[in-house]
Image (spheres, rainbow, N blue to C red):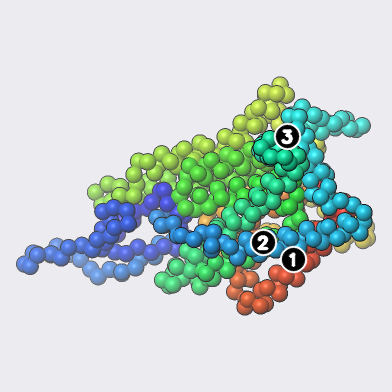
Amino acid sequence: MQRNASDSSAYASPRRTHVVGLTHPGPGVWHAPLPLPAGTPRPAGRLRRRQIIEPVTDLETRVTAGRPGALRRAAPALLGYAAVRALGLLALALWSAARDKSAYTLLTARWDSLWYTRVAELGYGYEVRLPNGDVHSDLAFFPLLPWLERLGAAVSPLSHADAGFVVSLSASLAAAWGIFAVAEHVYDQKEKDAQRGLGRVVVGDGRAGVCAVLLWAVLPVGIVQSMAYSESLFTALAAWSLYAVLTGRWVTAGALAALAGLTRPVGLAVTAAVWAAAIVAFVRSRSTVGPSGAHGPERAPSDGARRVIGMLLAPLGAAGYVLWVGHRTGRGPLGYLDVQAGWRNGFDGGVAFARFVAEKFTSFPSVLAGVGLVVGVGLLVLLYVVCVRQRQPLPLLVYAGVVTVLALCASSYFGSKPRLLLPAFPLLLPLALALARLRTPRSALVVGGVAVASAVYGAFWLNGSGPP
């Protein structure tokens, strides 16, 4: 039997089913074949009984009708996320008050927040020259968050710092919704396949999506999601771009990937996910032809055109800003790398980080930190392997892999690596699935305990060294 794959539809789970003997004259309409007239001779020699359901194990796309009530389905996840983040902010406020500090200042006017606010107020061009010769330029910070801060200050009485805080809070909720949408899409489809006998039974009632959101909220550095930083904004754009890829909305996916590329350098990961999915869809579409060489009805020319447009849009944000920085500095296309070098930041394949970890084993008690770092990296690798074994959709694997590699292999700011890993939410999906399989009281107890620990750690962290 020949298979028709839809290029402009959702990314299917690794195992699919097809019904034999149905014709598809148009979207949403399936007709059974008409019976042969009485006395009509049947073809000889090639007829045999075939299975009604045929398993398909490759990656391909499928048509899915949009279900109503998306916000209603996501409401438990969003309410749970808001509760966890409120707990974190409450702990920060109490801890800061005890130390005679302003929690709001810690959230909006420290570290990178100051750089973003300065760009929003005065534009690019500020730099700090350190005694050792390093040059810290604001060109290292991508422009989307400062643009939104400037917009917020222009249309409201908020200051630029206040606008950055509002953007971060709003974006964190959008990110939570996007994470829920991705997890729900992945595990609901797996549930459908399991019901057809094509895989292991998974939780398909939305609980896995809720658990994924809550796990993202209770990460030890989850307080960053409520700071005037770009992590929440980037994660929101990345999650919804990935969801658009999974549901075959190529132009939307490309546009959101372009915006993600204007937010952080790791926008490369979103672009890579869009391109990987589009290339796979192109290969599948080329291999799905009818008996006479004709393509299936879903393969309209516009499907391929939308896919190409999405691919072209995806890298525009990051490429445009990097080229602009090169032009402004007069150093050509690689000018942005020189800006990063001024911050002693770059990509060295993890050599500097490995050296940093090794140095922890030279004395006590720093050896405990070294053991913790080794265990943490090992857990990241293990989670990614589990994601592969659970056959997550290709775009999620590509995205999570690139984010993880870029975070771990950066040559400086080792204390920032947990923060840089915040957008890698697909790594949490195996844990979310395991948590969703627990009884509700037990899973609530686990999440509640971790949420309290995360809130206390976040308050301690920001009142101490804080995120560099």
Front residue of 427/379: it is 427
- CA distance separating discs 1 and 2: 10 Å
At 60% from the left and 48% from the top, the residue drawn is 238
Q: Secondary structure at mark 3?
A: helix
Q: Earlier in the sequence, mark 3 or mark 1?
A: 3
Locate residue 250, reporting x and y percent: 47, 45
Residue 272: quarter of image: top right
Q: Nearer the viewer, mark 3 or mark 1?
A: 3
Q: Is residue 379 left or right of residue 111?
A: left
Locate residue 261, reporting x and y percent: 62, 39
**Extreme residue toward the front, this view:** 157
Q: Nearer the viewer, mark 1 or mark 2?
A: 2
Q: What label does residue 120 carry, if any?
A: 3
Locate residue 326, reporting x and y percent: 68, 26
Q: Is residue 454 left or right of residue 284?
A: right
Judge the density around disc 1: few (<14), some (14-19), many (≥20) Cα neighbours within 10 Å. Answer: many
**Extreme residue toward the top, this view:** 330
Disc 2 marks a residue whose amino acid type is: Tyr
> Which residue is labeled 1 in the image?
451
> Which residue is labeled 2 in the image?
81
Determine whether 436 is above or below 15 in the image.
below
Q: Secondary structure at mark 1?
A: helix
Determine if residue 211 is in view. yes
